[in-house]
Image (spheres, rainbow, N blue to C red):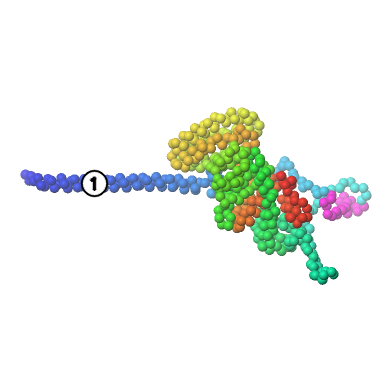
Amino acid sequence: MAKKKSGQEEENEILCLKKSLIISKQECAQWEEGFSQLEQGCAQLEKENQVLKEKLGANSGNSPKPSSQDPFRGSRSSRPTGSKPGGQFGHPGHIRALYSENKVTKNVDLFPEECSSCHSKIFEESVTSLQLHQVADISEISPNVTQYRIYTLKCAHCGKKVRAQLPKKAKHSFGPRLQAFLAAQSAEGLISRRRLSSLASYFKIRVSLGSTCNILKRAADLLKNPAKKIQEHVLQQGRIHADEISWRVTKEKSYLWMGATPDCTFFNVNPSRSVEAYKRIFGSFRGTLVTDRYSLCNQHPGRRQSYLAHIDRSLAKMEQREGVDAFCSKTSQKELGKIFALWHEYKAEKFSREELQKRAKDPIENIRTILMFAAEKAKLRQSKSLARNLLKCFSHLWTFLYEKGVKLTNNLAERALRPCVILRKISLGSQSTWEARLIERLMTVAVTLQQRLKNVFLFLTALFESFYEIRPPPFPSSVI
């Protein structure tokens, strides 16, 4: 028969049981806290994994990266046609145009020496036909050197020795054409200063690196007024395509701003990308501004067009995410594709602008509804932020539908910026303040002249000749 426990023993057992229960509760709390930390850690890892996947999958279709930087870029797949390389049957030929007679340096008359049929060497004097064949070449390059012999004579009246003065056109050791050529190559050829010095050796002229810098400094001073006039002319137009890229000046981060119209483009190097910088450059402009969704452009008092290609890439990036984010992205891209298709049909003159506006209403409203849904229900913060940003500038996305001449892309600005992007890759920016001024002024004039199909070298030659008082200044009538 079991021994009955005393009251003291029962109390001790109850006390031990309570202690064990307390320890179990503490352990459970610790486990719950540990699980909570693990869940938070997993959620953080999922977000980081999503960000890394987006970075890894970034390409020219879903980010501002150029196509040359696409990862795992393969060759274009094309089916073999079976024909040989080169010009195909039926392709219209291109015949080199002959130079006019006044540009021909030398004529060589060729007469047949022997008949290919009877081997006779006697021919009639009358000409049956005449065929012209021209061979173009460059003459041997040699410098055109003008030597000034400066005499010193003694005054017959007072006996003072007087030396002759150099004319202004001979003030420097290099003539206007050579200086203009080096400046033009710096702008159009995107050639560095050291290579410009090497290029001068082809003309059998030695131009040191220091002399090259002095020539480019002189060009920067001479181009100040033309570049200013071009910028003023652009800001007076009704429509401007604007963009900017980063640019280093003396190892400090700056920005190269630009504004482009179909016939004129200006560049401006500014140390910041702030609202104040925008107002300094575009403050006087009141027309339609075509640009990206950068928030400082909200300061523009006139109409705006945010180009849709940039938005399409942002939506393509959002498509890489899961769940609601991907669904909203795919649906928005589908509706945006309808608007692109309508625009191309309108450009092909299949219907009027009024019909374009009418057909685009439904896709636009569908996009608005999808963005409102994504702004509330999207899983990731980046997706919500994109949707809210697009809703904020929603009215700026469709200006091209209502204003003639406005396009849904910013290709005009991007084409004008491409030489500057290449130059930045070569030079890594500007090593001094005067170089920054040179870049903005030289590229302003060069790109504008190229848009107007005018010769940059001839303009710079005339500009340098005006500096040496050989002829009147060529600006502004020759550019604007």
Give the vertical position of 15 relative to 209 (above or below): above
Q: Residue at x 54, y 29 (%)?
A: 362
Residue 399: tell me if it is visible. yes
Q: Residue at x 82, y 70 (%)?
A: 158
Residue 461 x %, y %: 74, 54
Residue 4 x %, y %: 7, 44
Residue 293 x %, y %: 55, 41
Q: Quadrant of the N terminus?
A: top left
Residue 330: tell me if it is visible. no
Instruction: Choose between 427 and 4: the one closer to the eye.
Output: 427
In-image side of 369 versus 97 (left or right): left
Instruction: Tell me the element at label 1.
Output: helix
Residue hosting label 1? 24
Residue 50 x %, y %: 45, 45
Q: How many marks?
A: 1
Q: What's drawn in magenta, residue-wise?
A: 101-122
Q: Residue at x 49, y 48 (%)?
A: 56
Give the vertical position of 29 relative to 156 (above or below): above
Instruction: Choose between 113 and 434: the one closer to the eye.
Output: 434
Look at the magenta stretch and give its main secondary structure. Answer: loop
Quarter of the view holding residue 340: top right
410 magenta-colored: no
